[in-house]
Each structure stands twice: as structure tokens, then as C-alpha cells.
Amino acid sequence: AQKVTQAQTEISVVEKEDVTLDCVYETRDTTYYLFWYKQPPSGELVFLIRRNSFDEQNEISGRYSWNFQKSTSSFNFTITASQVVDSAVYFCALSELDSNYQLIWGAGTKLIIKP
Amino acid sequence: GAGVSQSPSNKVTEKGKDVELRCDPISGHTALYWYRQSLGQGLEFLIYFQGNSAPDKSGLPSDRFSAERTGGSVSTLTIQRTQQEDSAVYLCASSLGRGRTEAFFGQGTRLTVV
């Protein structure tokens, strides 16, 4: 059965520190997709990235970077030089072919960036 | 509009009353999801629509919950005989296809049952 684990319930760092949010997934399928979403205090979830199982290339977008490692079933998210505006709840999600691409969500990690 | 629109943004209702929550997805998006999010919690899947296919209702918590999607566009989530435990934010999302493309979320409807 597919599963997404975000073991870090809450992380608090001081502004400008780097922070990594962990996402570990379980799937028996070889075709699947992984996502990260951000939910700021306003409440609306914002899409950050999608990665399919055939593309292990890491991604960098400004201060954000993602490390996809199939060997450890992880899709971790790093924010470099964090800012107060990065404070939000971050969700990792998985969908797999065998489950008709039903989205399975992690419990989320609340990130607090202190000024 | 360009994004997913939900209405109302806030709804306070008395226990036992019925409520209807509306979602206008992004034009052209064939997939539509409803989720529920209780305070400080993750996303709980409720129901999924894909084009003209039968909806995936596997997440609906009870028969008091139902949803429809008319004309492949607007969706309405109905909760009958509301209970206090129904209090939550109800989120709607749409996408081009299930689970393979990014979903775009509305701002949610905060439902409070008193």
C-alpha cells in the first residue's frame, strides 16, 4: 500500500538558516508521482513541484531545492537562507499508477521561521 | 476567474441543518477533488470527479455527505444534518488529470457547526 511519511511535525529555525523537510514514501509501483505543496497561514495550498518516478534529477528553484532518491524512497525539500515568508505547513504527496493515481498525502510539516 | 473559486468562504450553521458548499474549478480541468482539513491536521480525501466517469466516493465519511458535479464543471458538496464534528475547512481542487498533474486549490470554505 502506498504511504507518505513526514516525520517532522514542526520545525523552528531562525531566519537565514537552511532547513530540510523530510518526505519518505512507500510504493510497490514503478510509475508514480511525487509532489510538494505549501500551505501558508492564509490557508490556500500552493503547488511547488512535481516529480515522476523516472526522473531522479534534483531540482533547484531559487532558494528551494528538492532531492529525490529512489534508493531511500525519499523526496526531501530544502530551503536555503530561510525567510519569515517561508513559514507555512508543507505537504508531500504521492500518486501511483496502480492506484489510479489517487493522491496520498503526508501529515504535513509546520515550518516556523523566526526573525 | 483564473483560479479555483469556493463559496462561501465562511459558513456558520446550526447543528442539524443542511449546508451546501460550492466549487468552481479552473476551466478545462476535468479532475475535481474535495478534501476536508480539520484545525492543524492534514488533508482528508472526500470525493473525486473525473470527466463523465463515476465519482470516487471512497472518502465520504458518512451518508450525510454527498457531492455532485454538473456539466463537468461546478461542484456542490452537501452535508445533511450537520454535526459539530463536521466543523472543518473544506477544500476543493482541480487538475487536468488525476494525480499526474498538479492540483490547484481554492481558498476553502470554513464550516463551523454550532
Image (tube, helix red, strand yellow):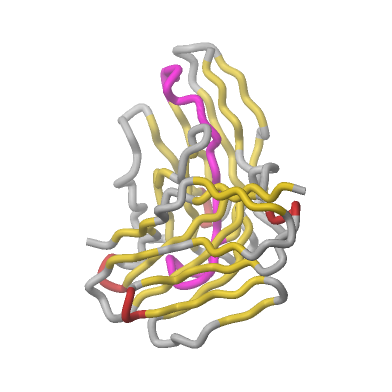
Residue A11 is situated, as x and y percent measured from the top left of the image, at 55, 50
Q: Is residue A65 left or right of residue A75?
A: right
Residue depicted at x 52% and y 46%: A10
Residue B44 is situated, as x and y percent measured from the top left of the image, at 41, 43
Q: Report which quarter residue A27 is drawn in.
A: bottom left
Q: Report which quarter residue B100 is drawn in.
A: bottom left
Residue B109 is situated, as x and y percent measured from the top left of the image, at 61, 35
Residue depicted at x 54% and y 64%: A20
Residue A62 is situated, as x and y percent measured from the top left of the image, at 72, 76
Number of numbered discs overlaid on the protein picture:
0
Which region is colored magenta? B80-103
* Residue nearer the viewer, A40 or A73: A73
Residue depicted at x 70% and y 72%: A63
Q: Is residue B75 visible?
A: yes
Q: Is B34 included in the stretch rendered in magenta?
A: no
Residue depicted at x 31% and y 67%: A100
Q: Report which quarter residue B62 is drawn in.
A: top left
Position of residue B8 relative to residue B31, above or below, is above
Q: Is residue B51 visible?
A: no
Position of residue B87 relative to residue B108, above or below, is above
Q: Is residue A114 left or right of residue B104?
A: right
* Residue nearer the viewer, A63 or B26: A63
